[in-house]
Amino acid sequence: MALGLVAAAVAGTVLVPVGYLVMRASELGLDGARTVLLRPRTAELAGNTVRLAAVVTVAAAALGVGLARLVTSAVGRGRSVLIGLLAAPLAIPSYVAGFVWTRLFPGFEGFWAAALILVLACYPLVLLPAAAAFTGMGRGQEDAARALGLGPVAVFARVTLPRVWPACAGGSLLVALYAISDFGGPAVVRYEPFTVGIYNAYNGAYDRSTPAIYGCVLAVVAIALAAAERGMRRDAPSAATAERPTARSGAVGAWVVSAVVLLAGIAVPVAGLLREITESTRLGFTTVGGALAWAWPDLRATLMLSVTAAAVIALAALPVAVYTARPPGPGAGPIEAVSYLGYALPGVTVALATVFVGIRLLPDWYLTTPLLIACYAVLFLPVCLGPARQALDAIPPRVPDAARTLGASDAATFARVRLPLAAPGIAAGAALACLSVAKELPATLMLAPVGTSTLATHMWSLNNDVAYGRAAVLGLLLVLVASVPTVALSMLLTREGQR
């Protein structure tokens, strides 16, 4: 009961921005809200958002699962290294990738440009849990299916995929939520889903009700996606077995395919940033030491906020993950669905709700680090919750049952059995939260304490001032900083799969 209350309290905190949206939307009344929802402009933004989210989710899931299967089945020596490299695009913020692609290729804009940027940014969210699941899955059932005459496609569809589906579904949910909530990538390539429409509405006129209605639509979509994902993974079989997969032929092909993906996901953005730096004549420094000294305040703020927020988010996500993992407690479905809301809402919307709370209810906390970290927790609770819950779900029920049979209480079983087994997944979620906070832009712009700037916010302001060389320096530093939790995430999930 106590655990359920804590989980409900955490989920209730996520409802704060939704409450703000409902309050603002209610200012129009039912007739006004209906008018906004039926506008051609609303239909256009909704169509843009749904189309982008659908294409990005399907493409990222296909790419992530395909690469995970290819690498784990074909590569023996160097498998962990290759998986780590394929996870590297997580370190590239979508707005940095968009900045580079538009600078390198004039005319790179619109729907397909936004889709490409988001697919390259998101596919590791599916790749990493899928690779961990494939790594921990034996080949006995696949070999038996082949012996019965099934072809490779049938074996994968009927035997392999159902066993790794929970991990793939969780990653795909994060991709879908990211696609409907991302602002920077689509904005840079001049594509307008709901997020960009909300930002433009906030800045174009003193109208808070119309963008609030748009935000409510995104909240409903997020709840539907979370409910659908929970339904799809319900009663899914565990992938864990006592066997260990062995690499088969095709290692060269796996490396070649991976190299092509990495060329677009990592090489192009990094090369573009380096070109901007080398061609700039207005850097103001000529050495690496000078660049680091100039960027140090931004770097220090980024590291401090990222690490602190990741720890807070992991602590908040743990009770929700435990309560909603198998076997779930009463009301686990609604609690889990609500917990995913923050990740689907644009950062500017959650930030505005936090500003409202700070000014009206917590004036002494307004523009302070604790309030900013609370905003991060609402935004990025799902990125930690997903891996933590998946790790708990992957524990065979017979393991904690055996501990209880030996007389251990539920608390002792959790502390001595479930928590150690799920620790890699929980730590992976914390690493992903750290990565997400380091790249966050609108919330930091609006809520950072006076005089505090991060690599992301300073880069954004320099880009707006057409100081592309200096912006590229900060972008490159941001990629390097984000690569640390990315490597940690890859190592943790790989180790989880090899348990």
Image: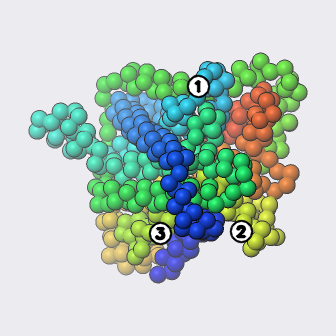
Q: Residue at x 40, y 76 (%)?
A: 330
The relative height of residue 447 versus residue 13 in the rendered view (above or below) is above
What is the C-alpha distance between the residues marked 2 and 3?
A: 22 Å
- For marks 3 and 1, give the one nearer the viewer: 1
On the image, the x and y values in percent for residue 90 come to: 56, 39
Residue type at numbered disc 3: Ile
Of the pair 433 and 391, the residue shown nearer to us: 433
Instruction: Kindly give the residue lying farthest to the top in the view shown.
Output: 279
Q: Secondary structure at mark 3?
A: helix
Numbered mark located on residue 108 in the image: 1
Q: Residue at x 67, y 63 (%)?
A: 353
Residue type at numbered disc 2: Val
Numbered mark located on residue 335 in the image: 3
Q: Residue at x 60, y 52 (%)?
A: 346
Q: Quadrant of residue 279?
A: top right
Label located before the other in sequence (1 or 2): 1
Q: Residue at x 40, y 40 (%)?
A: 58
Label located before the other in sequence (3 or 1): 1
Q: Quadrant of residue 430?
A: bottom right
Instruction: Kindly give the residue lying farthest to the bottom in the view shown.
Output: 1
Q: Is residue 438 left or right of residue 194?
A: right
Q: Secondary structure at mark 2?
A: helix
Q: Which residue is mark 2?
A: 357
Q: Are marks 1 and 2 in contact (CB under 8 Å)?
A: no
Residue type at numbered disc 1: Phe
What is the C-alpha distance between the residues marked 1 and 2?
A: 39 Å
Q: Residues within 10 Å of mark 3 (few under 14, many from 20)?
A: many
- For marks 2 and 3, give the one nearer the viewer: 2
Instruction: Kindly give the residue lying farthest to the right in the view shown.
Output: 284
Q: Are marks 3 and 1 in contact (CB under 8 Å)?
A: no
Label located before the other in sequence (2 or 3): 3
What is the C-alpha distance between the residues marked 3 and 1?
A: 41 Å
